[in-house]
Amino acid sequence: MIVTIVGSQLGDEGKGGVVDLYGDAADVVVRYQGGDNAGHTVVSDGEKYKLSLVPSGAVRDKVGVLGNGCVVNPETLFSEIDALRERGLEPDVRVAERAHVILPYHRVLDGIEEDEKDDLAAGTTKRGIGPTYEDKAGRRGIRIGDLLDPDTLRERLEYVVPQKRALAEDVFGVETGEEFDVEHLYETYREYGERIADEGMAVDCGTYLQERIDAGDNVMLEGAQGTSIDIDHGIYPYVTSSNPTAGGACVGSGLGPTVVGQGEVIGIVKAYLSRVGTGPLPTELGGVEGQTPGYDSEAAEGEEEALATYIRDEGGEYGTVTGRPRRVGWLDIPMLRHAARASGFTGLVVNHLDVLAGLDEVNVGHAYEREGEELLTMPPTTEQWGECEATFRTFDGWPEVDWAEVAAEGYEALPENARTYLEYLEAELDVPVYAVGVGPGREETVVVEDPFE
Ligand code: GDP
Ligand code: IMO
Ligand code: MG
Protein backbone atom coordinates (compact mmCIF):
# COMPACT_ATOMS: atom_id res chain seq x y z
CA MET A 1 0.00 0.00 0.00
CA ILE A 2 1.22 3.49 -0.85
CA VAL A 3 -0.02 6.65 0.83
CA THR A 4 0.98 10.08 -0.44
CA ILE A 5 0.82 13.16 1.79
CA VAL A 6 0.41 16.50 -0.01
CA GLY A 7 0.22 20.03 1.42
CA SER A 8 -2.93 21.62 0.02
CA GLN A 9 -2.14 25.26 0.74
CA LEU A 10 1.06 27.25 1.29
CA GLY A 11 3.15 24.85 3.36
CA ASP A 12 3.24 24.29 7.13
CA GLU A 13 -0.18 22.56 7.13
CA GLY A 14 1.08 19.97 9.62
CA LYS A 15 2.30 17.34 7.14
CA GLY A 16 5.05 16.04 9.44
CA GLY A 17 2.51 15.30 12.16
CA VAL A 18 0.28 13.40 9.72
CA VAL A 19 3.20 11.34 8.44
CA ASP A 20 3.89 10.49 12.05
CA LEU A 21 0.24 9.69 12.78
CA TYR A 22 -0.28 7.32 9.88
CA GLY A 23 3.35 6.29 9.66
CA ASP A 24 3.09 3.49 12.22
CA ALA A 25 1.93 1.18 9.47
CA ALA A 26 4.55 2.42 7.00
CA ASP A 27 7.85 0.66 6.59
CA VAL A 28 9.47 3.28 4.38
CA VAL A 29 8.89 7.06 4.33
CA VAL A 30 10.07 8.91 1.23
CA ARG A 31 10.53 12.63 0.63
CA TYR A 32 9.96 13.20 -3.10
CA GLN A 33 10.82 16.87 -3.63
CA GLY A 34 12.25 19.98 -2.03
CA GLY A 35 15.17 20.10 0.35
CA ASP A 36 16.04 21.79 3.62
CA ASN A 37 13.58 24.59 2.89
CA ALA A 38 11.00 22.39 4.61
CA GLY A 39 10.41 22.37 8.35
CA HIS A 40 8.37 19.37 9.48
CA THR A 41 7.43 19.00 13.13
CA VAL A 42 6.89 15.68 14.84
CA VAL A 43 5.88 15.58 18.48
CA SER A 44 6.60 12.14 19.90
CA ASP A 45 6.28 11.23 23.60
CA GLY A 46 6.43 14.90 24.48
CA GLU A 47 9.66 15.31 22.51
CA LYS A 48 9.56 17.77 19.64
CA TYR A 49 11.56 17.04 16.50
CA LYS A 50 12.00 19.68 13.80
CA LEU A 51 13.20 18.07 10.61
CA SER A 52 14.06 19.92 7.47
CA LEU A 53 15.54 17.14 5.36
CA VAL A 54 15.39 13.77 7.07
CA PRO A 55 11.95 12.22 6.34
CA SER A 56 9.62 12.43 9.35
CA GLY A 57 9.35 8.63 9.66
CA ALA A 58 13.01 8.41 10.70
CA VAL A 59 11.95 9.48 14.21
CA ARG A 60 10.06 6.19 14.54
CA ASP A 61 12.52 3.65 13.17
CA LYS A 62 11.21 3.72 9.61
CA VAL A 63 13.58 3.77 6.69
CA GLY A 64 13.67 7.38 5.48
CA VAL A 65 14.47 7.92 1.80
CA LEU A 66 15.33 11.16 0.06
CA GLY A 67 14.01 10.58 -3.43
CA ASN A 68 15.54 11.62 -6.73
CA GLY A 69 13.22 14.63 -6.85
CA CYS A 70 14.88 16.14 -3.78
CA VAL A 71 17.76 18.59 -3.63
CA VAL A 72 20.09 17.53 -0.87
CA ASN A 73 22.45 19.62 1.19
CA PRO A 74 24.79 17.01 2.69
CA GLU A 75 25.83 19.37 5.47
CA THR A 76 22.22 19.66 6.68
CA LEU A 77 21.63 15.96 6.15
CA PHE A 78 24.50 14.86 8.34
CA SER A 79 23.92 17.48 10.99
CA GLU A 80 20.29 16.33 11.30
CA ILE A 81 21.28 12.68 11.43
CA ASP A 82 23.95 13.44 14.06
CA ALA A 83 21.48 15.48 16.12
CA LEU A 84 18.97 12.61 16.08
CA ARG A 85 21.70 10.19 17.13
CA GLU A 86 22.60 12.47 20.02
CA ARG A 87 18.97 12.21 21.12
CA GLY A 88 19.25 8.44 21.22
CA LEU A 89 17.64 7.60 17.86
CA GLU A 90 19.15 5.46 15.12
CA PRO A 91 17.77 7.00 11.92
CA ASP A 92 18.10 4.80 8.82
CA VAL A 93 18.32 7.32 5.99
CA ARG A 94 18.89 6.53 2.30
CA VAL A 95 19.45 9.00 -0.46
CA ALA A 96 18.78 8.62 -4.17
CA GLU A 97 21.87 8.64 -6.37
CA ARG A 98 19.83 10.68 -8.84
CA ALA A 99 19.03 13.42 -6.31
CA HIS A 100 20.78 16.72 -6.93
CA VAL A 101 23.23 18.26 -4.49
CA ILE A 102 22.93 21.76 -3.07
CA LEU A 103 26.40 23.29 -3.12
CA PRO A 104 27.55 26.34 -1.16
CA TYR A 105 27.44 28.52 -4.29
CA HIS A 106 23.73 27.73 -4.69
CA ARG A 107 23.03 29.16 -1.27
CA VAL A 108 25.11 32.27 -1.94
CA LEU A 109 23.38 32.82 -5.29
CA ASP A 110 19.92 32.30 -3.75
CA GLY A 111 20.67 35.20 -1.38
CA ILE A 112 22.09 37.46 -4.08
CA GLU A 113 19.20 36.85 -6.49
CA GLU A 114 16.57 37.43 -3.83
CA ASP A 115 18.12 40.79 -3.01
CA GLU A 116 18.21 41.72 -6.72
CA LYS A 117 14.63 40.70 -7.47
CA ASP A 118 12.95 43.24 -5.26
CA ASP A 119 9.19 43.01 -5.99
CA LEU A 120 9.53 39.60 -7.62
CA ALA A 121 11.37 38.08 -4.66
CA ALA A 122 9.50 35.07 -3.29
CA GLY A 123 11.02 35.55 0.16
CA THR A 124 12.93 32.28 -0.24
CA THR A 125 14.48 30.37 2.61
CA LYS A 126 17.90 31.11 1.04
CA ARG A 127 18.83 27.45 1.22
CA GLY A 128 19.83 27.37 -2.44
CA ILE A 129 16.74 25.45 -3.53
CA GLY A 130 15.93 27.49 -6.66
CA PRO A 131 19.52 27.72 -7.98
CA THR A 132 19.99 23.95 -7.52
CA TYR A 133 16.81 23.07 -9.46
CA GLU A 134 17.91 25.61 -12.11
CA ASP A 135 21.17 23.73 -12.54
CA LYS A 136 19.29 20.42 -12.66
CA ALA A 137 17.14 21.70 -15.52
CA GLY A 138 20.19 23.38 -17.10
CA ARG A 139 21.99 20.01 -17.10
CA ARG A 140 24.91 21.34 -15.12
CA GLY A 141 23.89 19.95 -11.74
CA ILE A 142 25.87 17.64 -9.49
CA ARG A 143 24.10 14.55 -8.23
CA ILE A 144 24.57 12.37 -5.17
CA GLY A 145 25.95 9.66 -7.47
CA ASP A 146 28.67 12.08 -8.60
CA LEU A 147 29.87 12.52 -5.01
CA LEU A 148 30.60 8.79 -4.98
CA ASP A 149 32.75 9.05 -8.07
CA PRO A 150 35.62 11.53 -7.50
CA ASP A 151 36.64 11.78 -11.17
CA THR A 152 33.14 12.71 -12.28
CA LEU A 153 32.80 15.10 -9.35
CA ARG A 154 35.98 16.93 -10.32
CA GLU A 155 34.99 17.09 -13.97
CA ARG A 156 31.56 18.52 -13.14
CA LEU A 157 32.95 21.07 -10.70
CA GLU A 158 35.61 22.22 -13.15
CA TYR A 159 32.89 22.87 -15.69
CA VAL A 160 30.32 24.59 -13.51
CA VAL A 161 32.17 26.50 -10.80
CA PRO A 162 33.87 29.08 -13.08
CA GLN A 163 30.43 29.88 -14.53
CA LYS A 164 28.97 30.41 -11.08
CA ARG A 165 31.93 32.53 -10.03
CA ALA A 166 31.54 34.71 -13.13
CA LEU A 167 27.83 35.06 -12.44
CA ALA A 168 28.43 36.20 -8.86
CA GLU A 169 31.37 38.46 -9.64
CA ASP A 170 30.68 39.85 -13.10
CA VAL A 171 26.89 39.97 -13.19
CA PHE A 172 26.10 40.66 -9.55
CA GLY A 173 29.37 42.33 -8.56
CA VAL A 174 29.86 40.22 -5.45
CA GLU A 175 33.22 39.07 -4.15
CA THR A 176 33.47 35.29 -3.90
CA GLY A 177 35.24 32.99 -1.46
CA GLU A 178 35.73 29.27 -0.87
CA GLU A 179 32.09 28.62 -1.87
CA PHE A 180 33.28 29.13 -5.45
CA ASP A 181 36.65 27.35 -5.17
CA VAL A 182 36.92 24.07 -7.11
CA GLU A 183 39.62 22.53 -4.88
CA HIS A 184 37.80 23.32 -1.67
CA LEU A 185 34.48 22.04 -3.01
CA TYR A 186 36.06 18.90 -4.43
CA GLU A 187 37.69 17.96 -1.11
CA THR A 188 34.61 18.72 0.99
CA TYR A 189 32.06 17.00 -1.24
CA ARG A 190 34.24 13.98 -1.93
CA GLU A 191 34.30 13.45 1.82
CA TYR A 192 30.52 13.69 1.99
CA GLY A 193 30.43 11.08 -0.78
CA GLU A 194 32.71 8.81 1.27
CA ARG A 195 30.42 9.09 4.27
CA ILE A 196 27.36 8.32 2.14
CA ALA A 197 29.17 5.25 0.78
CA ASP A 198 30.52 4.15 4.20
CA GLU A 199 27.07 4.33 5.76
CA GLY A 200 25.47 2.50 2.82
CA MET A 201 23.05 5.34 2.21
CA ALA A 202 23.01 5.59 -1.59
CA VAL A 203 20.11 3.93 -3.40
CA ASP A 204 18.57 3.71 -6.83
CA CYS A 205 15.33 5.10 -5.44
CA GLY A 206 12.64 3.73 -7.78
CA THR A 207 14.19 0.26 -7.88
CA TYR A 208 14.65 0.20 -4.12
CA LEU A 209 11.04 1.23 -3.50
CA GLN A 210 9.62 -1.23 -6.00
CA GLU A 211 11.53 -4.04 -4.31
CA ARG A 212 10.14 -3.02 -0.94
CA ILE A 213 6.61 -2.82 -2.38
CA ASP A 214 6.99 -6.25 -4.01
CA ALA A 215 8.06 -7.63 -0.63
CA GLY A 216 4.76 -6.39 0.82
CA ASP A 217 6.02 -3.26 2.58
CA ASN A 218 3.94 -0.14 3.09
CA VAL A 219 5.35 3.07 1.66
CA MET A 220 4.50 6.62 2.58
CA LEU A 221 5.42 9.45 0.23
CA GLU A 222 5.92 12.64 2.25
CA GLY A 223 5.44 15.87 0.34
CA ALA A 224 7.07 19.09 1.45
CA GLN A 225 5.74 22.63 0.86
CA GLY A 226 2.21 22.92 -0.56
CA THR A 227 0.12 23.12 -3.72
CA SER A 228 -0.05 26.90 -3.93
CA ILE A 229 3.74 27.14 -3.88
CA ASP A 230 4.13 24.36 -6.49
CA ILE A 231 6.20 25.66 -9.41
CA ASP A 232 3.51 24.64 -11.94
CA HIS A 233 0.28 24.91 -9.98
CA GLY A 234 1.15 27.62 -7.49
CA ILE A 235 1.26 31.40 -7.39
CA TYR A 236 4.22 31.80 -9.74
CA PRO A 237 6.73 33.43 -9.24
CA TYR A 238 6.13 33.42 -5.45
CA VAL A 239 6.68 29.67 -5.38
CA THR A 240 9.26 27.06 -4.57
CA SER A 241 11.09 25.37 -7.45
CA SER A 242 9.63 21.86 -7.26
CA ASN A 243 6.29 19.99 -7.50
CA PRO A 244 4.74 19.26 -4.09
CA THR A 245 1.57 18.05 -5.88
CA ALA A 246 0.99 14.31 -6.27
CA GLY A 247 2.51 14.16 -9.77
CA GLY A 248 5.78 15.12 -8.10
CA ALA A 249 5.48 12.02 -5.94
CA CYS A 250 5.80 9.85 -9.06
CA VAL A 251 8.58 11.75 -10.79
CA GLY A 252 10.44 12.36 -7.55
CA SER A 253 10.39 8.77 -6.31
CA GLY A 254 10.73 6.74 -9.49
CA LEU A 255 7.33 5.03 -9.05
CA GLY A 256 4.79 5.28 -11.86
CA PRO A 257 1.45 7.10 -11.55
CA THR A 258 -0.40 3.79 -11.78
CA VAL A 259 1.56 2.52 -8.78
CA VAL A 260 1.16 5.67 -6.70
CA GLY A 261 -2.46 5.95 -7.82
CA GLN A 262 -3.35 2.51 -6.50
CA GLY A 263 -2.96 3.97 -3.06
CA GLU A 264 -4.37 7.07 -1.41
CA VAL A 265 -3.46 10.72 -1.84
CA ILE A 266 -4.18 12.70 1.29
CA GLY A 267 -4.46 16.47 1.22
CA ILE A 268 -3.35 18.20 4.40
CA VAL A 269 -5.38 21.31 5.17
CA LYS A 270 -4.78 23.90 7.85
CA ALA A 271 -8.20 25.12 9.09
CA TYR A 272 -7.11 28.67 8.19
CA LEU A 273 -4.24 30.01 6.07
CA SER A 274 -0.69 30.82 7.01
CA ARG A 275 1.92 32.12 4.63
CA VAL A 276 5.65 32.78 4.78
CA GLY A 277 6.52 34.91 1.79
CA THR A 278 5.24 37.58 -0.51
CA GLY A 279 2.50 37.86 -3.16
CA PRO A 280 -1.29 38.29 -2.98
CA LEU A 281 -3.52 36.45 -0.51
CA PRO A 282 -7.25 37.22 -1.02
CA THR A 283 -8.45 35.93 2.37
CA GLU A 284 -5.62 37.53 4.36
CA LEU A 285 -6.42 39.05 7.74
CA GLY A 286 -4.40 42.15 8.57
CA GLY A 287 -0.88 41.92 7.19
CA VAL A 288 2.83 41.61 7.85
CA GLU A 289 5.30 44.33 6.96
CA GLY A 290 7.65 43.29 4.18
CA GLN A 291 5.47 40.34 3.08
CA THR A 292 1.93 41.67 2.49
CA PRO A 293 2.02 43.79 -0.67
CA GLY A 294 1.49 47.49 0.11
CA TYR A 295 1.04 46.88 3.82
CA ASP A 296 1.79 49.69 6.24
CA SER A 297 1.94 48.49 9.85
CA GLU A 298 1.76 52.07 11.17
CA ALA A 299 -1.72 52.51 9.70
CA ALA A 300 -2.91 49.04 10.71
CA GLU A 301 -5.50 48.73 13.42
CA GLY A 302 -9.03 47.50 14.09
CA GLU A 303 -10.90 44.27 14.41
CA GLU A 304 -9.22 42.48 11.54
CA GLU A 305 -5.74 43.14 12.93
CA ALA A 306 -6.87 41.91 16.35
CA LEU A 307 -8.27 38.74 14.78
CA ALA A 308 -5.05 38.17 12.84
CA THR A 309 -3.01 38.56 16.01
CA TYR A 310 -5.34 36.18 17.86
CA ILE A 311 -5.02 33.44 15.24
CA ARG A 312 -1.28 34.05 14.89
CA ASP A 313 -0.75 33.71 18.64
CA GLU A 314 -3.07 30.73 19.14
CA GLY A 315 -1.55 28.92 16.18
CA GLY A 316 2.06 29.84 17.01
CA GLU A 317 2.39 31.33 13.54
CA TYR A 318 5.86 32.75 14.00
CA GLY A 319 8.91 31.66 12.01
CA THR A 320 10.73 28.86 13.81
CA VAL A 321 14.14 30.31 12.98
CA THR A 322 13.54 34.04 12.63
CA GLY A 323 10.58 34.49 15.01
CA ARG A 324 8.98 36.71 12.35
CA PRO A 325 5.17 36.76 12.30
CA ARG A 326 3.60 34.72 9.49
CA ARG A 327 0.78 36.09 7.39
CA VAL A 328 -2.60 34.56 8.31
CA GLY A 329 -6.03 34.46 6.68
CA TRP A 330 -9.33 32.62 6.49
CA LEU A 331 -9.57 29.31 4.72
CA ASP A 332 -9.56 29.80 0.95
CA ILE A 333 -11.90 27.28 -0.70
CA PRO A 334 -11.04 28.07 -4.35
CA MET A 335 -7.42 27.32 -3.39
CA LEU A 336 -8.51 23.97 -1.96
CA ARG A 337 -10.69 23.05 -4.97
CA HIS A 338 -7.62 23.68 -7.12
CA ALA A 339 -5.45 21.54 -4.83
CA ALA A 340 -7.95 18.66 -4.66
CA ARG A 341 -8.09 18.52 -8.46
CA ALA A 342 -4.35 18.96 -9.10
CA SER A 343 -3.47 16.02 -6.83
CA GLY A 344 -6.66 13.95 -6.96
CA PHE A 345 -7.12 13.82 -3.20
CA THR A 346 -8.82 10.72 -1.86
CA GLY A 347 -8.89 11.95 1.74
CA LEU A 348 -8.34 15.09 3.80
CA VAL A 349 -6.68 15.78 7.11
CA VAL A 350 -7.83 19.07 8.58
CA ASN A 351 -5.40 20.41 11.18
CA HIS A 352 -5.46 23.28 13.68
CA LEU A 353 -9.21 23.15 14.29
CA ASP A 354 -8.42 23.96 17.94
CA VAL A 355 -6.74 27.23 16.95
CA LEU A 356 -10.05 28.71 15.78
CA ALA A 357 -11.92 27.65 18.94
CA GLY A 358 -13.34 30.51 20.96
CA LEU A 359 -14.12 32.78 18.01
CA ASP A 360 -17.76 33.94 17.70
CA GLU A 361 -17.73 33.42 13.97
CA VAL A 362 -15.46 31.64 11.54
CA ASN A 363 -15.33 32.81 7.92
CA VAL A 364 -14.23 31.00 4.81
CA GLY A 365 -13.52 32.48 1.39
CA HIS A 366 -16.12 30.43 -0.52
CA ALA A 367 -15.49 31.93 -3.98
CA TYR A 368 -13.75 34.88 -5.65
CA GLU A 369 -15.17 37.78 -7.55
CA ARG A 370 -13.13 39.24 -10.39
CA GLU A 371 -14.33 41.61 -13.09
CA GLY A 372 -17.94 40.96 -12.11
CA GLU A 373 -17.57 37.19 -12.42
CA GLU A 374 -17.70 34.52 -9.75
CA LEU A 375 -14.74 32.11 -9.70
CA LEU A 376 -14.82 28.83 -7.80
CA THR A 377 -11.19 27.95 -8.36
CA MET A 378 -7.87 29.78 -8.62
CA PRO A 379 -7.22 31.71 -11.84
CA PRO A 380 -4.06 30.73 -13.73
CA THR A 381 -2.01 33.88 -13.22
CA THR A 382 -0.99 35.43 -9.96
CA GLU A 383 -1.85 38.88 -11.31
CA GLN A 384 -5.44 37.69 -11.85
CA TRP A 385 -5.41 36.10 -8.42
CA GLY A 386 -4.32 39.43 -6.94
CA GLU A 387 -7.42 41.03 -8.46
CA CYS A 388 -9.76 38.50 -6.86
CA GLU A 389 -11.94 39.58 -3.96
CA ALA A 390 -12.99 36.73 -1.73
CA THR A 391 -16.68 36.30 -1.04
CA PHE A 392 -17.16 34.89 2.41
CA ARG A 393 -19.44 32.41 4.13
CA THR A 394 -19.82 32.67 7.85
CA PHE A 395 -20.02 29.77 10.29
CA ASP A 396 -20.90 29.92 13.97
CA GLY A 397 -17.80 29.45 16.08
CA TRP A 398 -17.10 26.52 18.39
CA PRO A 399 -15.94 26.57 21.99
CA GLU A 400 -12.59 25.66 23.50
CA VAL A 401 -12.97 22.12 24.87
CA ASP A 402 -10.71 19.37 26.23
CA TRP A 403 -9.29 18.37 22.88
CA ALA A 404 -7.39 15.32 24.09
CA GLU A 405 -10.67 13.97 25.42
CA VAL A 406 -12.43 14.72 22.13
CA ALA A 407 -9.66 12.96 20.22
CA ALA A 408 -10.01 9.92 22.45
CA GLU A 409 -13.80 9.81 21.98
CA GLY A 410 -13.82 10.33 18.22
CA TYR A 411 -15.42 12.45 15.53
CA GLU A 412 -18.90 12.70 17.10
CA ALA A 413 -17.35 14.31 20.19
CA LEU A 414 -16.23 17.36 18.18
CA PRO A 415 -18.34 20.47 18.85
CA GLU A 416 -21.32 20.51 16.51
CA ASN A 417 -20.35 23.77 14.82
CA ALA A 418 -16.88 22.42 14.11
CA ARG A 419 -18.46 19.37 12.46
CA THR A 420 -20.62 21.67 10.33
CA TYR A 421 -17.44 23.44 9.17
CA LEU A 422 -15.76 20.12 8.30
CA GLU A 423 -18.82 18.78 6.51
CA TYR A 424 -19.02 21.93 4.40
CA LEU A 425 -15.40 21.34 3.39
CA GLU A 426 -16.06 17.69 2.51
CA ALA A 427 -19.03 18.67 0.37
CA GLU A 428 -17.21 21.48 -1.46
CA LEU A 429 -14.18 19.35 -2.28
CA ASP A 430 -16.05 16.10 -2.63
CA VAL A 431 -13.38 14.41 -0.52
CA PRO A 432 -13.95 12.76 2.88
CA VAL A 433 -12.22 13.92 6.04
CA TYR A 434 -9.91 11.17 7.31
CA ALA A 435 -8.62 12.93 10.40
CA VAL A 436 -8.87 16.19 12.30
CA GLY A 437 -5.96 17.81 14.14
CA VAL A 438 -7.01 19.39 17.42
CA GLY A 439 -3.55 20.00 18.88
CA PRO A 440 0.13 19.49 18.02
CA GLY A 441 0.52 16.06 19.68
CA ARG A 442 -0.16 12.79 17.92
CA GLU A 443 -2.84 11.90 20.45
CA GLU A 444 -4.56 15.23 19.74
CA THR A 445 -5.93 13.93 16.47
CA VAL A 446 -9.42 12.66 15.75
CA VAL A 447 -8.90 9.71 13.43
CA VAL A 448 -11.84 8.76 11.23
CA GLU A 449 -10.05 6.66 8.64
CA ASP A 450 -6.57 5.10 8.48
CA PRO A 451 -5.51 4.87 4.83
CA PHE A 452 -3.25 1.89 5.51
CA GLU A 453 -6.09 -0.20 6.94
P1 GDP B 1 4.60 20.94 7.99
O1 GDP B 1 5.67 21.77 7.39
O2 GDP B 1 3.41 20.83 7.10
O3 GDP B 1 5.07 19.59 8.46
O4 GDP B 1 4.10 21.73 9.27
P2 GDP B 1 5.03 22.47 10.38
O5 GDP B 1 5.60 21.43 11.26
O6 GDP B 1 5.95 23.43 9.74
O7 GDP B 1 3.96 23.36 11.11
C1 GDP B 1 2.88 22.86 11.77
C2 GDP B 1 2.92 23.32 13.25
O8 GDP B 1 1.65 23.18 13.81
C3 GDP B 1 3.84 22.48 14.13
O9 GDP B 1 4.34 23.29 15.16
C4 GDP B 1 2.90 21.40 14.67
O10 GDP B 1 3.32 20.86 15.89
C5 GDP B 1 1.64 22.20 14.84
N1 GDP B 1 0.40 21.46 14.63
C6 GDP B 1 0.16 20.45 13.76
N2 GDP B 1 -1.15 20.08 13.81
C7 GDP B 1 -1.72 20.88 14.72
C8 GDP B 1 -3.08 21.00 15.21
O11 GDP B 1 -3.99 20.31 14.80
N3 GDP B 1 -3.28 21.96 16.16
C9 GDP B 1 -2.29 22.76 16.63
N4 GDP B 1 -2.60 23.68 17.54
N5 GDP B 1 -1.02 22.68 16.18
C10 GDP B 1 -0.76 21.75 15.24
P1 IMO C 1 7.11 22.95 4.60
O1 IMO C 1 7.53 21.64 3.97
C1 IMO C 1 6.15 27.18 3.99
C2 IMO C 1 8.28 29.22 0.71
C3 IMO C 1 9.28 30.31 1.06
C4 IMO C 1 9.17 31.18 -0.18
C5 IMO C 1 9.00 30.17 -1.30
C6 IMO C 1 10.28 29.84 -2.04
O2 IMO C 1 7.62 23.14 5.99
O3 IMO C 1 5.65 23.12 4.46
P2 IMO C 1 12.41 28.37 -1.45
O4 IMO C 1 13.42 28.53 -0.36
O5 IMO C 1 11.68 27.07 -1.43
O6 IMO C 1 12.97 28.69 -2.80
O7 IMO C 1 11.31 29.52 -1.13
O8 IMO C 1 8.46 29.02 -0.70
N1 IMO C 1 8.50 27.92 1.38
C7 IMO C 1 7.75 27.43 2.37
N2 IMO C 1 6.71 27.96 3.05
N3 IMO C 1 6.53 25.92 4.25
C8 IMO C 1 7.55 25.36 3.57
O9 IMO C 1 7.89 24.05 3.70
C9 IMO C 1 8.24 26.13 2.61
N4 IMO C 1 9.28 25.90 1.79
C10 IMO C 1 9.42 26.99 1.03
O10 IMO C 1 8.89 30.98 2.23
O11 IMO C 1 8.02 31.98 -0.14
MG1 MG D 1 6.85 23.45 7.82
Image (cartoon, rainbow, N blue to C red):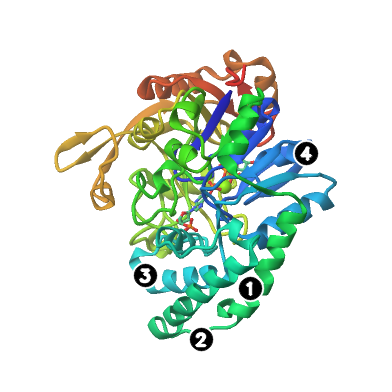
Q: Which mark is residue 175?
A: 2
Residue 41 image offset from top left, x and y in percent: 65, 44
Relative to 418, does residue 270 appear above or below in the rendering?
Answer: below
Please name which of the two marks, 4 or 2, marks the residue nearer to the observer: 2
Residue under the point 37% across and 70% down: 117
Residue under the point 55% across and 19% down: 415
Inspect the image, locate mark 1, and give the three-letter code of the amino acid beneath it.
Tyr
**Looking at this view, is 214 or 173 the one in front?**
214
- Within-10-Å neighbours for mark 1: few <14, some 14–19, many 20+: many
Q: Which callout, 3 or 1, points at the residue further toward the start of the chain?
A: 3
Q: Which callout, 1 or 2, points at the residue further toward the start of the chain?
A: 2
Residue 413 image offset from top left, x and y in percent: 61, 15
Residue under the point 45% across and 84% down: 169
Q: Which residue is mark 4?
A: 46
Q: Quadrant of the C terminus?
A: top right
Q: CA distance from mark 3 to mark 2?
A: 19 Å
Inspect the image, locate mark 3, and give the three-letter code of the amino acid beneath it.
Lys
Inspect the image, locate mark 2, and give the three-letter code of the amino acid beneath it.
Glu
Q: Which residue is mark 3?
A: 117
Please name which of the two marks, 3 or 2, marks the residue nearer to the observer: 2
Residue 226 lies left or right of residue 79; in this view the side is left
